[in-house]
Image: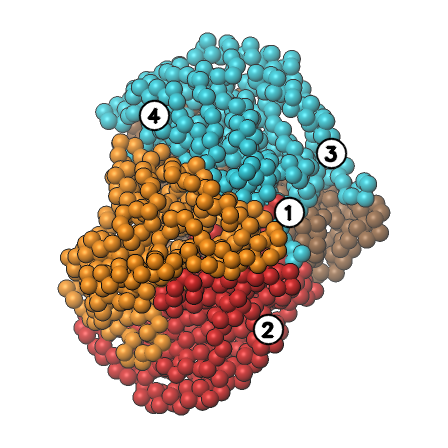
Chain colours: A orange, B red, C brown, D cyan
Amino acid sequence: MMSGSTFGTLFRVTTWGESHGRAIGVVVDGCPAGIELSEMDVQRELDRRRPGQSTATTERHEADSVEILSGIFEGITTGTPISMLVWNRDARSSHYDSIRHTPRPGHADYTYHVKYGIRDHRGGGRASARETVGRVAAGAVARKLLSEFGVEIAGYVSELGGISASLPRWTSRGSIEREELLDIRERAESSPIRCPDAAASSRMLSLLDSVRSDGDSIGGVVEVIAIGVPPGLGEPVFDKLDADLAKALMSIGAVKAVEIGAGFESARLRGSEMNDPLFYENGRISFERNNAGGILGGISTGAPILCRMAVKPTPSIARSQRTVDMVSGESVDISVRGRHDPSIPPRIVPVAEAMVALVLADHILRQRSARLR
Amino acid sequence: MMSGSTFGTLFRVTTWGESHGRAIGVVVDGCPAGIELSEMDVQRELDRRRPGQSTATTERHEADSVEILSGIFEGITTGTPISMLVWNRDARSSHYDSIRHTPRPGHADYTYHVKYGIRDHRGGGRASARETVGRVAAGAVARKLLSEFGVEIAGYVSELGGISASLPRWTSRGSIEREELLDIRERAESSPIRCPDAAASSRMLSLLDSVRSDGDSIGGVVEVIAIGVPPGLGEPVFDKLDADLAKALMSIGAVKAVEIGAGFESARLRGSEMNDPLFYENGRISFERNNAGGILGGISTGAPILCRMAVKPTPSIARSQRTVDMVSGESVDISVRGRHDPSIPPRIVPVAEAMVALVLADHILRQRSARLR
Amino acid sequence: MMSGSTFGTLFRVTTWGESHGRAIGVVVDGCPAGIELSEMDVQRELDRRRPGQSTATTERHEADSVEILSGIFEGITTGTPISMLVWNRDARSSHYDSIRHTPRPGHADYTYHVKYGIRDHRGGGRASARETVGRVAAGAVARKLLSEFGVEIAGYVSELGGISASLPRWTSRGSIEREELLDIRERAESSPIRCPDAAASSRMLSLLDSVRSDGDSIGGVVEVIAIGVPPGLGEPVFDKLDADLAKALMSIGAVKAVEIGAGFESARLRGSEMNDPLFYENGRISFERNNAGGILGGISTGAPILCRMAVKPTPSIARSQRTVDMVSGESVDISVRGRHDPSIPPRIVPVAEAMVALVLADHILRQRSARLR
Amino acid sequence: MMSGSTFGTLFRVTTWGESHGRAIGVVVDGCPAGIELSEMDVQRELDRRRPGQSTATTERHEADSVEILSGIFEGITTGTPISMLVWNRDARSSHYDSIRHTPRPGHADYTYHVKYGIRDHRGGGRASARETVGRVAAGAVARKLLSEFGVEIAGYVSELGGISASLPRWTSRGSIEREELLDIRERAESSPIRCPDAAASSRMLSLLDSVRSDGDSIGGVVEVIAIGVPPGLGEPVFDKLDADLAKALMSIGAVKAVEIGAGFESARLRGSEMNDPLFYENGRISFERNNAGGILGGISTGAPILCRMAVKPTPSIARSQRTVDMVSGESVDISVRGRHDPSIPPRIVPVAEAMVALVLADHILRQRSARLR
């Protein structure tokens, strides 16, 4: 869209707020009228992204109680903008005075400075992970819409610091049963790492402890699956469903790569291995496998949407790093203090799910104008 | 944007046309006035994407002579829309009659059918690679704009069918000299595979021959590098530069994954390895390495932009594949006849460069409103 | 929209081309699949806007044969962009050499110069009335879509040079019968002034002759009525139906004012006179009168849409006018030579109808996402 | 834009909130970094639109204290979204129970119902004049930006209930001195009607009293003038400056007509009277008069921007009106109770000024990409 803080074309989301400002929030415009929506629906998702839930995540305690300020009447969406807000609390900005003029490596400090000439440096300001509060709140609304169409979305951590979870090979299957997906999700949510493989999860946790005591951090891989997505979503040739998903996921801080379906593996397959054969099943067209990740020519096929993304290690680390002092013009070494996740992927999961939900909700509405009737 | 055939916000590109329709073209709106532009500038890029140039690409012969119909006066852009058109010739649509009701695996045949209820099936219609004519023509205009700011873009094939080229490790360097990039580019352009490593290129060519005689196809990896990109480009939090690049590249048919900088490798690095330390060089901030791929917090750092994408094998293969007949409702086996590239990556290179150019041109204009003065 | 050459959000129209360039055209993106559309449908409307049809309009002879280059397959829209083009012929640009540096009063010559620093001065370039070819062609597509929903649009000249036609007082009626509207339209089309009142039309024609021999020009008022518009169209609070109509009509060159329903008269009515009482008729809500012009709160009521616009006199006049020579910096007197309409309103009629059609087509599609089902 | 609650392309404003919801607010995205902005700057404008200031306006007492929640750091805009909020107080929604199923004539009750199937009927919900709080707050930000470029905006009531103020004939002058405009403004602000002609103002006030005791209401005409507008603003051919102004002003509830410059009068002028001759003054191009209203070909000329709009009488009147009961399906008579302005134009003035400011701020930013340098 035109201004960087808005996402979507018909189901449109505008986030606002800085990490240590007064509040953070989002306006959802274009949500159809007639959907049941309560603050509880949104709070449930916000609680999933909230830090301080386990030893695997940062210790900052944020209540993050959402307030819905407009767009709902007697518990139902009215078609008018839904404004949601969370007040910022427990924001000890003095932690950040030292970084005002010394951009942290791996952070957006320098780039915001060079772009705008001014930045709210406290806690990363607008570039903070806290901005995802708005995304997750909006995603909760999108999920309510999607649930009316039978769409289910689940995400999890499939790899952390090089440790891979043992998981089904989704690209080899044309479909995924709802029960199986919900089971995967439940197992992920019960792990502090959000990894559905309990054995891998516990090894990841050990690694995390050792990395934390090193004053370092690690990255990982997050996967999101959506089932029940109707065929026909996506607007060629630029607003293809996979193109919009790639943008949505790459717009999450710390994500450095996105794959759809077989992803980079497709570069090594033959056409006869890559192409998913079609067949009829219960009178509907299905696919024998799903290397396409549920998208062909930028349009959904009806098979599961498979997304995978690389998450870089948390840039804020205690270990000493070289940077510059923009006032004195000298090189300095810094060590980033404060309460930081040693690894972001577990917290990326609800954000990535939210972004997938926003893309699907938008395209479900856009699809309505593809045909005369 | 709102309608799927338009890309960009200020430098806006709308492509139109089907593979076997009368013509194919593009309208570029929002190009600033005052840029020298001739049909030759555009033709040069179109010639690079044209099939039939080597044994590595399809045999279809297309002249693809561009005509600029508006927006230029006395050789200079006027700020008004630039309309460009290429007539379709040599379109033997009878080749395609057999696929009208039998969607080809790996193609958009089924998804266009289910979305629109009708499709121009000849040669893939709108989903054809031929649509990229418009992208490349628009990209040529974007490159003229970018060259005024000193931006240089080069792409090449780094991997084909599992064979990797030997190339510098770009993420380990904070900058790339123009001469080196132009040299890489020249070597790539002199290879039928567009691979700058001559030894790898010849092995790729052999593999291609054997794959072709198998009636099969292979995929590969394409990389695009942009240098001279001013710091400050990108509009957080959704229109981040990397998010827009991911969308741009994923919108190319056959691309299934996109990486920025260290990409998936970042998932396996420690924070202390991933973060790029800053230092002053000639009074400007530089980076000791470039795992970030030239982008932090969605905003360009001034370091080279590094993009990498996976290209799936050509879906059109001579080998027999299983699909359905949508009229009879029965399973059938098909073999896709016609003139098809056994591998797409060499032809993706100019398209990927064009898409990177479109994103950068758009963000150079958007950046102009970031500050009061 | 973002770039000035595009109109609409879902039914999107991008025009391109200059008066004396090689061609002029339009791309319609977002037209739903499944609509019958032929070049004849478009040609019919283009013929209505073509100059040289009567003594009341300019003598320039333009064939204006439209070519549809994409988006149609076997006579049906496919949901992909519809590109249409008309070649420019009979363009004697030497007529315009004298105005290169002397901006014509009332024209866009100076403002294009100051904005872009360069302009195609021949025949007004992009600011020429010829640009409306693209609008009318796109409007013809919109009308095909609208006719599927029973919408009928008719425009006419209600006033010229101060002479008013005798017409029904539309605001006093809650509805208009299709037969009556078609009759009005037929009478308008049979008049060289496009005025449905034959007596007024002939007086206007006499005035026109006398004004022409004075080397002067006159303005007038154009009205457009749309019936059969479903209630519920319009997107508060900014994309209200009346707001979008105002923009659409004011974007036509020479239009200086727009009224909806009672328009300026509403400033002089009491609330008890202005408000349109509601009642049930055949089980549907109707209105006793239509001061609202079919729109309340920016949303269509189902009553006829009533638009009225002021058209200024043709700025190109033979009489001497004062301007400046931008090269010498001196004041000069100019007389604009060439083939010019002494009055524009008759030719504005099909353009205004087209713009109303574009707005309604867009909002019919947008309305589809207002509700969950 | 795409969703109805957003206005602008680069300087983008999204309003949210219903009359009797918890709060009402706006997000301004795309405001450049580096502008001084305080809550006082915004409050000053909000106080101007607030009801309860004089006998001429409604008696509802609203504190309307704005809170800026983001986008400002140390008193300076940072280039990130500016979120502003006003809590709703004193909202006696029981007043409105009776209108739940009986749409008020002249109101949006019926159209919201038919569009969305549900509406927050309390106080007009989203269609309430209260929505303009967000517009005025955003307009205050736009004015700060514009003041950096020397733009001054002033509005006033020029006609009420048929009584016209005596004012200069602005179209006859090529320029307006700042002192004169500020004087006009001051006189308007000191009148309860916001009419700069004291004699007319007092006659309007008397009329208003008599209309109120009749249980009726009256409309009027509002004018807005902007001086210091740089030439070159406006994006042909659809986002012309006059087209965007027309949309902006027509999107204000109760506005039924918009004129630019000579407006409807142009329909009655000859070309030789309408065209504004050019001349050099202090080395700059000026105009001998300003029938164009400062805009030619949709681009600003540098002369004053002249806008005029018709405001209908307040639809809420005590007098009995005929409508329907949508539950029983019967005709009923209603009398609208509650605290209502008998005339809206005085309160439209700050809203119309805000809308003009939003359009100009947006186009000042858009203009930056018109040229290469």
Q: Nearer the viewer, residue A325 or B186?
A: A325
Do the CB atoms of the residues marked 4 and 3 lie less than 8 Å apart?
no
Secondary structure type for disc 1: loop
Work out whether B60 lies above or below D19: below
Residue on which the image places disc 3: D175
Whether callout 3 and callout 1 share a subunit is answered no
Q: Disc 1 residue type? A: Arg
Q: Residues within 10 Å of mark 1 (few under 14, many from 20)?
A: few
Quarter of the picture containing the C terminus of chain C is top left
CA gap, disc 4 and disc 1: 45 Å
Residue on which the image places disc 2: B177
Do the CB atoms of the residues marked 3 and 1 lie less than 8 Å apart?
no
Q: Disc 3 residue type? A: Ser
Q: Nearer the viewer, mark 2 or mark 4?
A: 2
CA gap, disc 4 and disc 3: 46 Å
Q: Nearer the viewer, mark 3 or mark 1?
A: 1
User: Residue at the location (47% across, 51% down)?
Assistant: B236
Residue on which the image places disc 4: D122
